Amino acid sequence: MKVVRYFFVGAVAAAVDIGLFALFVHGFGLDYLAVGAVTFVLATSVNYALSVRVVFRSGVRFSRRQEIALVFAVSALGLALNQLVLFVGVTRFALPPVLAKVMATAAVFFWNYGARAHFVFK
């Protein structure tokens, strides 16, 4: 059941990530890699806030401060994967940046859930 709730939390965070990404890349013409990193961090914050409300029990294993630090540490690898998929998608496969972002978000979803479920909130 947790994975289903996490899917919905992830969908909200993905909407924030992809929506802001599209706005700043297409609407303002900003660099897709820089925007991708910023929107990823914002979406990670949304994901954490929602996750501790509806998916995981916060403060069980670590203090709130440690928990947030661990979520962002786990997400650092997710950010690296996000940036790699974005870069390869746009430069190697000539995908539109938003399509590459959607693919990157999907790739990172499973890493984030697994690492959080087994390492941070176990």
Image (tube, rainbow, N blue to C red):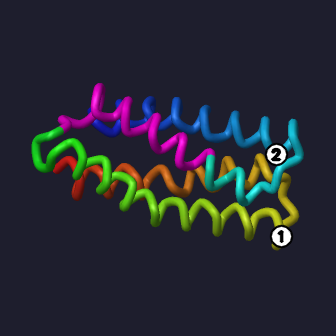
> Residue at position x 37%, y 60% from top?
74
Provide residue 46's location: percent of width, then percent of height: 46, 34
Which residue lies under the disc numbered 1? 91
What residue range appears in magenta?
39-58
Q: Is mark 2 on a helix, strand or loop?
A: helix
Crowd class of label 1 (few under 14; some 14 to 19; many from 20; radius 10 Å): few
> Residue at position x 73%, y 55% from top?
100
**Quick one: 72 or 84, which is closer to the camera?**
72
What secondary structure do most residues of the magenta stretch adopt? helix
Provide residue 20's location: percent of width, then percent of height: 69, 36
> Per the image, is 56 magenta?
yes
> Residue at position x 85%, y 53% from top?
96
Among numbered discs 2 and 1, the one appearing first in the sequence: 2
Check whether the beta carbons of the residues at disc 2 and disc 1 lie within 8 A of each other: no
Type of amino acid under label 2 = Val
| Label drawn at residue 7 | none
Type of amino acid under label 1 = Thr
Can you say which quadrant of the picture contains the N terminus?
A: top left
The outermost residue toward the bottom is 92
Which residue lies under the disc numbered 2? 25
Crowd class of label 2 (few under 14; some 14 to 19; many from 20; radius 10 Å): some
**Quick one: 103 or 116, which is closer to the camera?**
116
* 104 on left or right of 34: left
Provide residue 121's location: percent of width, then percent of height: 20, 47
